[in-house]
Image (cartoon, rainbow, N blue to C red):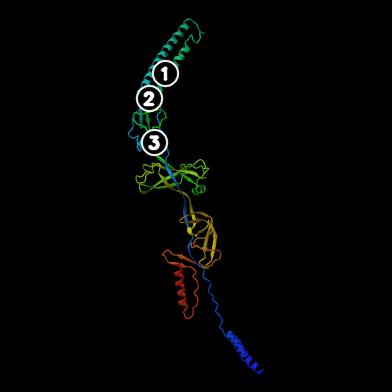
Amino acid sequence: MGRLIAIIAPIAIILILGVGGFIAVSAFKPEAEKSEEPQAGLNVFAEPVKEVALTLTVEAQGEVRPKREISVSPQISGRVAYVSPDFIDGGFIRKGQVLVRVEGEDYELGVVRARSTVASAEQRLAREIAESELAQQDLEDLGMTDASPLARREPQLAEARAALDAAKSQLQDAQLALARTAVVAPFDGRVRERMVDIGQVVAPGQSLGQIFGNDVVEVVLPLKDEEIGRLGLPLAFASSAKTPGPEVVFTATVGGEPRTWRGQVVRTGAAINSQTRQINVIAELNDPFGKGADNGAPMAPGLFVNAEIQGRALDRVLVAPRSALRGDDQLFIGDPKSGKLSIRTVDIEHSDKDGAYFHEGAKVGELAIISPVQAPFDGMSLTVMQRMEDGTVKVHNPPKPAKADGKDEKVAKAETGKGSEGAAQ
């Protein structure tokens, strides 16, 4: 029994001392300090929302074509006797200039024959007039008042007059045919191609070449319904003095150099394309080879050009960076004081590489976040940073520095500020 007590007693003493020591250590252990520093938010860059005046534009492409272009054709047949030296590919022509002349000897003979016929018809009419007067005098001498028209030679006189009219018509036809031996230019322009030469026999309606007017060229620009609305044009638009069309700036590279021409929208197409669901807008440029040229470089037919059309003007519209637009109609706004995220829905009026334009949903001066944000939600903690015009970065709501043992509080704040600036840069 004594032996058992001797064994148990030390063990009991050790347990009592251990438990008592743990209780004493726990009682005198200093309480852990609770940090009052809020959790740092995600570092994001932001730019302010601004108010600007904006003129909407629409970009399109199209091929330049002449407003007037015809195929030169003769109205008579014959052998070509003359071709104008200006009637060549690329040649300049004037209104009324003779381009091609057909041999006219046969038609000159036709005029001579027609004149002879007219002279014969005139002589016959004169004889019939005299005979009619004699017949009338004879009837009066005989006292016949009820003589027939044939006795008074009225049908013969009418026939002679009709024959003279027919002869004169033949003469006019012969003279017209003779005049048509010369094929003249109906307007000032240029020659696209020539397909005839001296000695060739041509027929009525045969194409001798292509010419186009150089006074006006036009470009057909297919646009979507949304783009038509951006221009503020109705579907049945026609330019007039009271309602001029929007200005169009054409650009293209000619001879290795960028060129610019300024034209105007003059009308819209008559119908919407059933396949593309687009409508054509026609823009024109006056005097493309003269005053409308860019330092002597004309906007020639066949050239493929880019067109920028001026649309509606917005006097006061809000703009945020294009990179701040999320999806089709959302902006992330960072509160510089609270450091919280606000997700806004805006009605986008227009967007391009320079920004997203809208009327409502944000205020001037609010900071639109341009940095990517994963799993965003309203009230999300952020550290909003803004790059200033001088290149420095302004941290609007920096994290509060923690108090560090053995360091002065000012030193801790300085180090925290450096760390934030380094993260921002």
Q: What is the secondary structure assignment of the residue under circle 1? A: helix
Residue 18: x and y in percent read: 60, 87
Residue topped by disc 2: 178
Calculate the distance from the C-alpha at mark 3 to the C-alpha at mark 2.
24 Å
* Label 1 or label 3, whichever comes before in sequence order: 1
The residue singled out by tag 1 in the image is: 167
Identify the amino acid type marked 2.
Leu
- Residue 162: where, in percent of width, then height? 45, 17
Q: Amino acid at mark 3?
A: Ile
Q: Residue at x 60, y 89 (%)?
A: 14
* Above or below, comparing residue 93 to residue 28 in the picture: above
Vertical comparison of 145 with 345: above or below: above
- Residue 260 % position (x, y): 39, 48
| Sequence-first tag of 3 and 2 | 2
Disc on the earlier residue, 2 or 1: 1
The residue carrying pointer 1 sits among few (fewer than 14), some (14 to 19) or many (20 or more) residues within 10 Å by Cα, namely many
Instruction: Classify the position of the C terminus by image quarter.
Output: bottom left
Q: Position of residue 420 (x, y in %)?
A: 46, 70
Q: CA distance from mark 2 to mark 1?
A: 17 Å
Q: Decide: few, some or many residues near mark 3? Use Cα within 10 Å; few <14, some 14-19, many ≥20.
A: many
Q: Quadrant of the N terminus?
A: bottom right
Which dot, 2 or 1, sits closer to the camera?
2
121 on left or right of 41 = left
SS at mark 2 in the image: helix
Residue position marked by numbered label 3 in the rendering: 211
- Residue 50 in sight here: no
Q: Quote the CA–CA distance across marks 1 and 3.
A: 38 Å
The amino acid marked with disc number 1 is Ala
